Amino acid sequence: MTLLLVGALAFALFFASDCAQLRRCPGTVLFSLGGVLLCGATLPLLFSVKRDLFAILCAAAALGFLALLLYTLFFALPKNAYTDGRPALVDRGVYALCRHPGVLWLGGFYLCLWGVCRTQDALIAFLWFTLLDVAYAAWQDRFVFSRTIAGYSAYRARIPFLLPTVRSIRLSIRRPDDREV
């Protein structure tokens, strides 16, 4: 139960980070602290790891989802993603797939972590943290990004919220000459 509260506090810090951004205050410390707390809520789940083929396959998939999450949050944005301290719209790569691809990767990570551990705590963490992430993404989508990113309303009309479509998948794998695959 404590882990779930620590995880909820992590998402509260993510929320506070965005509130600071709306007030044009730096919020990176809050976001970073939230990330540390979410890691802290996750690590104890690893004490119940199974050691069979299914767990190994789930662990490999969990690492893949974690890599996608880290890439999406920290490396998918181009160097010019911020203009005059404000975020610019990015609608290529993973951000053409859906508006909040990190939710997919975080949910996939915790689902696979449950497959590695197969404990009730891991299942509840998967459900709770994914639900919190969906709520956080919905709040960002409705209240934060429309105020902080120019062109976000048009982006919302073109790109699905969470579940990729055939069209958005094709857009996400555009060729360098900007043509769809």
Image (cartoon, rainbow, N blue to C red):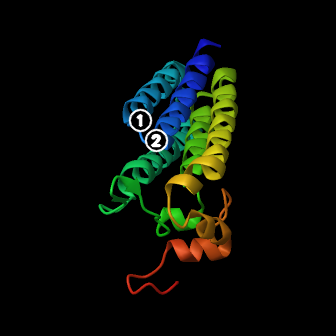
Q: Residue at x 50, y 53 (%)?
A: 148
Tell me if label 2 and label 1 are in contact, CB under 8 Å.
yes
- Residue 7's x, y, as percent? 57, 24
In this rendering, position of residue 136 left or right of residue 59: right
Residue at point 39%, 32% (across, down): 32
Q: Quadrant of residue 26?
A: top left
**Label 2 belongs to which residue?**
21
Q: Which mark is residue 27?
A: 1
How dense is the environment of label 2, judged by Cα within 10 Å: few (below 14), some, or many (20 and up)? some
Q: Would residue 100 be seen by someone viewing this image from the given angle?
A: no
Q: Is residue 173 left or right of residue 25?
A: right
User: How far across and how far down the image is residue 133, in percent?
Assistant: 62, 39
**Disc 1 element:** loop
Whole-percent x, y for residue 162 in the image: 66, 56
Q: Amino acid at mark 1?
A: Gly
| Nearer to the camera, 153 or 180 | 153
Q: Whole-Å distance between the Cαs marked 2 and 1? A: 6 Å
Q: Secondary structure at mark 2?
A: helix
Q: Residue furthest left?
A: 79
The quarter holding residue 125 reads top right
User: Which residue is rendered at x = 65% and y = 23% of the image?
Assistant: 119
Does residue 142 appear anywhere in the picture? yes
Asked whether, in this view, residue 85 is left or right of residue 10, the answer is left
Q: How many marks?
A: 2
Q: Earlier in the sequence, mark 2 or mark 1?
A: 2
